[in-house]
Image (tube, grey):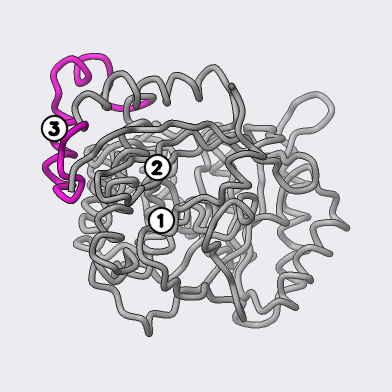
């Protein structure tokens, strides 16, 4: 099998409710710049990353795939994924201009597509190719009802709907601000208390600040959250602040979750070594694909830390990875891109359905490529 062509795309998919807000962002569309890798056997592998649908930066990612990685891949056997990962990652001109950011996101899309091809060539879903078992139970937790621009009434209504669907875990956003732009902890804590009271015994609630707070606010909020039995506090402060996260982890009873904004195995190593993270949320489309994701998951597992990948049904490859790796028992649910996939992720009675189609679950419907494609 040989790679014959790389075909890039950019999708911009509307998010739920016409727009969402968290502690740091407001988003109306989810971006998926990516690539379809064609082979001489007719098999096509699909990979993509996730953005906030900014067309100029999305084009930078696809340009990197086409112009920088494409020449290094044409004619290669796509099944030699690890060797190709090293070839792209260690290529001196690319290594010089970036070992994270745009080049890393582009590499992630390529690596996911290569693993998709490898699994298709084997005639297996990726989770089975990686050694997972069909009996694996992977619980879903829902985030899509917990945005800051939802009223308290909407938040409660969405939570009750998820409970009726069988979910036993939900995540809500914190990092509210008042009319003057100051942090509004009173609102955040009121909403956490509202959801905690609505949940049955044994159900879990997580909170996510999306890096919005400063350290003092995070310490104050974290101590208050301990009263509500919160499963984790996610990205409480700026993503790269390793000393700050380590201080929070030592000071708070509530565990710290983070990882969707870390790009490399080295970054995860440093956070883990510092005791700054308890739930490792490594994202295969922010680190350099499946290959680097697996190394991070192994590192976390060696430290007896749970791995909870970032968004299963938008980044469908995470469903396969979570089913395959023993450190994973929980996966996020945000279904914005559900109608884009040939085999979309599904949740029944609070757990993800095990996919059976060969590949990484990333194959896109032609109708979705036509409907959501931008930048022609």
Which element is circle 2 on? Answer: loop
Which element is circle 3 on? Answer: helix
Q: Quadrant of the C terminus?
A: top right
Image position, residue 67 (x, y; %)? 31, 18
Q: Residues within 10 Å of mark 2 (few under 14, many from 20)?
A: many
Camera-nearest residue between 257 and 316: 316
Image position, residue 292 (x, y; %)? 25, 46
Using residue 48 as the reference point, say whether residue 333 is left or right of it: right
Image marks 3 and 1: residues in contact by CB distance under 8 Å: no
The residue pinned by badge 2 equals 285
N-terminal of the two: label 3 or label 1? 3
Camera-nearest residue between 101 and 29: 29
Q: Which residues are magenta?
A: 74-101
Image position, residue 253 (x, y; %)? 47, 59
The residue pinned by badge 3 equals 87
Q: Residues within 10 Å of mark 3 (few under 14, many from 20)?
A: some
Image marks 2 and 3: residues in contact by CB distance under 8 Å: no
Query: Residue shown at 23%/48% (left/top)?
Result: 291
- Nearer the camera: disc 2 or disc 3: 3
The residue pinned by badge 1 equals 317
N-terminal of the two: label 2 or label 3? 3
Image marks 1 and 2: residues in contact by CB distance under 8 Å: yes
Spatial CA distance of label 1 from label 2 is 9 Å
In reply to whether residue 100 is colored magenta, the answer given is yes
| Residue 196, picture quadrant | bottom right
């Amino acid at each position: 099998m040989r790679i014959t062509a790389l075909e890039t795309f950019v999708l911009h998919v509307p998010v739920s409710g016409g727009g969402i807000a968290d502690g740091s962002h407001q988003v109306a569309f989810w971006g998926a710049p990516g690539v379809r890798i064609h082979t001489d056997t007719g098999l096509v592998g699909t990979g993509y990353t996730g953005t906030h649908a900014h067309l100029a930066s999305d084009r930078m990612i696809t340009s990197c795939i086409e112009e920088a990685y494409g020449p290094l891949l044409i004619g290669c056997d796509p099944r030699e994924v690890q060797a190709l990962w090293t070839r792209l990652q260690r290529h001196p001109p690319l290594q010089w201009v970036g070992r994270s950011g745009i080049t890393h996101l582009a590499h992630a899309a390529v690596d996911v597509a290569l693993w998709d091809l490898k699994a298709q060539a084997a005639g297996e879903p990726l989770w089975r190719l990686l050694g997972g078992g069909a009996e694996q139970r992977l619980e879903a937790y829902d985030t899509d009802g917990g945005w800051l621009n939802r009223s308290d009434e909407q938040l409660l209504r969405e939570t009750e709907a998820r409970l009726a669907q069988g979910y036993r875990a939900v995540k809500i956003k914190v990092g509210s601000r008042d009319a003057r732009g100051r942090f509004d902890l009173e609102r955040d804590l009121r909403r956490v208390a509202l959801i905690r009271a609505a949940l049955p015994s044994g159900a879990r609630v997580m909170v996510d600040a999306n890096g919005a707070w400063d350290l003092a606010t995070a310490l104050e909020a974290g101590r208050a959250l301990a009263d509500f039995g919160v499963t984790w506090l996610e990205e409480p402060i700026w993503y790269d602040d390793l000393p700050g996260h380590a201080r929070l982890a030592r000071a708070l009873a509530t565990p710290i979750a983070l990882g969707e904004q870390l790009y490399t195995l080295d970054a995860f190593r440093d956070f883990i070594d510092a005791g700054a993270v308890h739930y490792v949320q490594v994202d295969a489309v922010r680190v350099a694909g499946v290959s680097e994701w697996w190394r991070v998951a192994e590192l976390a597992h060696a430290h007896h830390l749970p791995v909870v990948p970032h968004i299963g049904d938008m980044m469908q490859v995470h469903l396969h990875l979570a089913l395959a790796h023993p450190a994973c028992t929980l996966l996020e649910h945000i279904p914005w891109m559900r109608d884009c996939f040939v085999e979309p992720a599904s949740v029944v009675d609070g757990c993800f359905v095990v996919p059976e189609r060969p590949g990484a679950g990333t194959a896109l419907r032609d109708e979705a490529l036509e409907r959501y494609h931008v930048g022609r």
